[in-house]
Image (spheres, rainbow, N blue to C red):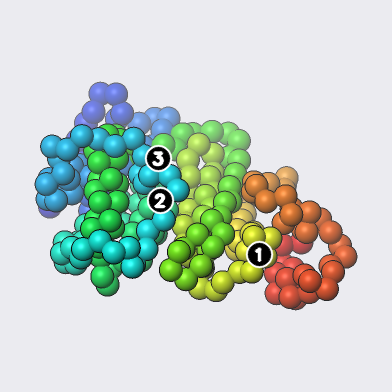
Amino acid sequence: MQFLKVFEMKDLGELHYFLGLEVWRNAVQNFVCQSNYVRYVLKIFKMDNFKSFVVTMQQNVKLSCVDGSKEVNDTMYRQTVGSLNYITITRPGISYSMSVLSRFMEKPLEIHWNATKEVLRYLKGTLDYGIKYTDASNVELTSYLDFDWAGNTDDQRSTTGYAFGIGSGVVSWSSKKKPIVSLSSLEFEYKALCAATCEVVWLRKHLQYVGEEKEEPTIIKCDNQSSIKLVNNSIFHARTKHVNAQFHFVR
């Protein structure tokens, strides 16, 4: 029951363990991380002596289930990916990588295992990273949205990701491959914008419930100019009729 012990640290305050989750507390801030659990995972999978890596996954790398490389131990792969998925509780930066790697549980190949080791090496170099929440009189709700249209080389499905922060720290995040194929980046981004809007509405109601009601509107930051113009356009054309019927919730 070592995770239930409480330790005193001079700089960060009290440390509370709960199932591998470390919560540092003092008078003005809370810091949540999983440093010891990451060390444990690195040791279990014999990656603690490897050099650290600067990114979670190499940019523009497209992983496929028919890459042509040889198969690897599927049990080891599943155990590693499962352990890394648990670390996303305090490390939202690896959420996209784990979303991609989790797609190859059935038949992992060597290229997938190499990408998994890159995530482990990245965590080795960022052991002390986590999420910090500070006391603030103005609790602002911030939201970010991005997407990867038709980025999956096997089925041409798209991936969307969002992150929502309250005050100094992120409180809700997701990276998920969509179950349908979108014919345009506009259509997919607008659907993702709808999902993000639903999450914002829920967070605003939750803030109201705890006494932090927001009178000002919440800005959702996305980078698709076409979808932004579509939200502001009160006249839908024939090509966007299906969007008008299913996803007009954003307005």
Instruction: Point out residue 37 in the picture as x, y percentages from the top left corner.
Output: 21, 46
Instruction: Point out residue 44 in the picture as x, y percentages from the top left corner.
Output: 12, 50
- Judge from the rendering whether residue 248 lies leftward or rightward of residue 154; answer left or right: right
Residue that carries the numbered disc 1 in the rendered image: 184
Farthest-out residue, front: 68
Quadrant position of residue 125: top left
Badge 3 marks a residue whose secondary structure is strand
User: What residue type is disc 1 on?
Assistant: Ser
Quadrant position of residue 137: top right
- Which of 157 and 95 lies nearest the eye of the viewer? 157
Q: In whole angstroms, how far apart are the C-alphas of marks 2 and 3? A: 28 Å
Tell me which label, 2 or 3, sits earlier in the chain.
2
Tell me which label, 1 or 2, sits earlier in the chain.
2
Within 10 angstroms of label 3, few (less than 14), some, or many (20 or more) residues? Answer: some
Residue that carries the numbered disc 3 in the rendered image: 131
- Which numbered tag is attached to residue 99? none
Tell me which label, 1 or 3, sits earlier in the chain.
3
Badge 2 marks a residue whose secondary structure is loop
- Which of 35 and 13 lies nearest the eye of the viewer? 35
- Which numbered tag is attached to residue 61? 2
